[in-house]
Image (spheres, coloured by chain):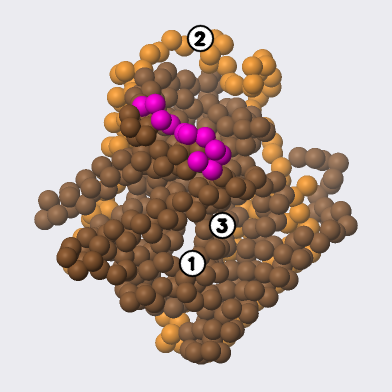
Amino acid sequence: MSYHLNYLFLGVFFVGACAVPVLALGLARLIAPRKPGKEKLSSYECGVETSGDAWVQFRVQYYLFAILFVVFDVEALFLFPWAVVFREMGMAGLAAMAIFLGILALGLAYAWQEGVLEWD
Amino acid sequence: MGLGFLIPAIVILAAAPIGMMGLTWYERKVIARMQDRFGPNRVGPYGLLQPIADGIKMFTKEDLVPEGADRFCHLLAPILMVVPSLFLFTVLPLAPGAVAAPLATGLLFFMAAGSSETLAIFMAGWGSRNKFSLLGALRSAAQMISYEVPLLLTLAVIPLVVGSLNLVEVVKAQEGFRWFCATPWGLTALALTLIAGLAEVNRTPFDLPEAESEIVAGFHTEFSGMKFALFYMAEFLSTLALAALAAILFLGGWDGPAAGVVPARWTNALWMTAKTLGMVFVMIWIRGTFPRFRMDQLMGFAWKVMVPLSLANGLGACFWVLRPGLAGNVVSAALPLGAFLVFTQLWLTPKPHLTTKWIDPALKL
């Protein structure tokens, strides 16, 4: 029971944590001047007139790294619970995780060999 | 009971901005000393009131939202950046019993809160409708997710050895000067955590997302006034929390000799603070010393050196647990060292120009 109060605390803390930036922004809104102008509101491009739209296509490689990340992030999800009970499992546990990680490492090695990790 | 909740919450929410203000002063002073300057010395004794002057300035600056921007994203991004960075402090113990939420999953909670800042950064970049902002946000996202993989793999050695993700248990396991930085795997993990952590909080030499000579100020180019201040605050809070985490995981947290006269709780809190400030100093030192990475070096280093190295280190820690004594120590030192030598060579050796075979090079996206 008392342990679950920790999560209740985090809920209370969430309200307080949100209040910090909201209050700061609210106070700044009351104090700060507001004199918008056409030049001032155009998006910043080092003083040169803005050209074209900013919402453009970008390199496909960003997605490739995102895919690699998802693979290893899901793997971390398995790794942490395994690590907590590692002492009880001993060598057998190590072997099981080594096989799992070995397959993932092979995937990374394949991506490396295919040039996915080259940024150019 | 209601009061029992409010006190730690108020302490964190009040101490965090004050700590952040102190940290800005500390960083500017240390950097100045390294660059043979004085740093802030006009406002108050030793420039100590400079952060307050900066705060007042931030409050009185106009808040600009560029035309055509996604106003909702633009407003929400700084808030979503600060809230998780405050949450980082809820699981960090300062002294025995002095922790707001001693979660059994503390380490995982810390990582989850820290990595959610990637989303806020991308919202900021996308919401600004500015090319520099979008480029900075993309770089940030790519960098943060790339370095999160070695960071997670590295930190997995802690539950491996301690058998718990609770940060209080982690410190208790190191009490009596059995600090993890004195073990071969612990030393490697400390180095990896610092490197990946610097990348996670976008600090030099990993500050490409804010490389001012290339993309102005990156994802926060279009933010001014209080919104900019909130980004700044989140960055410093994350740095502070990361330093504290490194001190807890590898430097024994509150463990240290007691002074006898003063109650042990006070010396414990003092030790924890001193270690955290020491780690912060190392980060500032790195900032004052190293040049910035290049984008391809940055990504290559994460995937080709850090990931294999953290895997080898984890394997070394497994042996250290299973075979205590000399054998475990030798194996857990040799594995990461070997991996480091092999993979830095593989990473640095010049190779024939490689591009992803199945992407048309003429496309140049």
Q: State how far apart marks 3 and 1 are (Cα).
A: 13 Å
Q: Are marks 2 and 1 in contact (CB under 8 Å)?
A: no
Can I make out residue A102 in this image?
Answer: yes
Magenta residue check for B329:
no
For the magenta stretch, what is the residue range?
A: B33-43
Task: Identify residue for label 1.
Answer: B155
Check disc 1 and give the amino acid type: Leu
Relative to B129, residue B3 above or below: below
**Residue B314: where, in percent of width, then height?**
55, 75
**Quadrant where the image shows the C terminus of chain B:** top right
Check disc 3 and give the amino acid type: Ile
Q: Do the residues labelled 3 and 2 touch (CB within 8 Å)?
A: no
Chain appearing in brown on the rendered image = B
Q: Dot 2 falls on which chain?
A: A
Task: Identify residue for label 3.
Answer: B195
Task: Identify residue for label 2.
Answer: A37
The tint of chain A in the picture is orange
Task: Give the dominant element type of the magenta stretch: helix, strand or loop.
Answer: loop
**Residue A113: where, in percent of width, then height?**
79, 64
Q: State how far apart marks 2 and 1 are (Cα).
A: 50 Å
Which of A19 and B70 lies nearest the eye of the viewer?
A19
**Residue B260: where, in percent of width, then height?**
19, 69
Relative to B232, residue B187 above or below: below
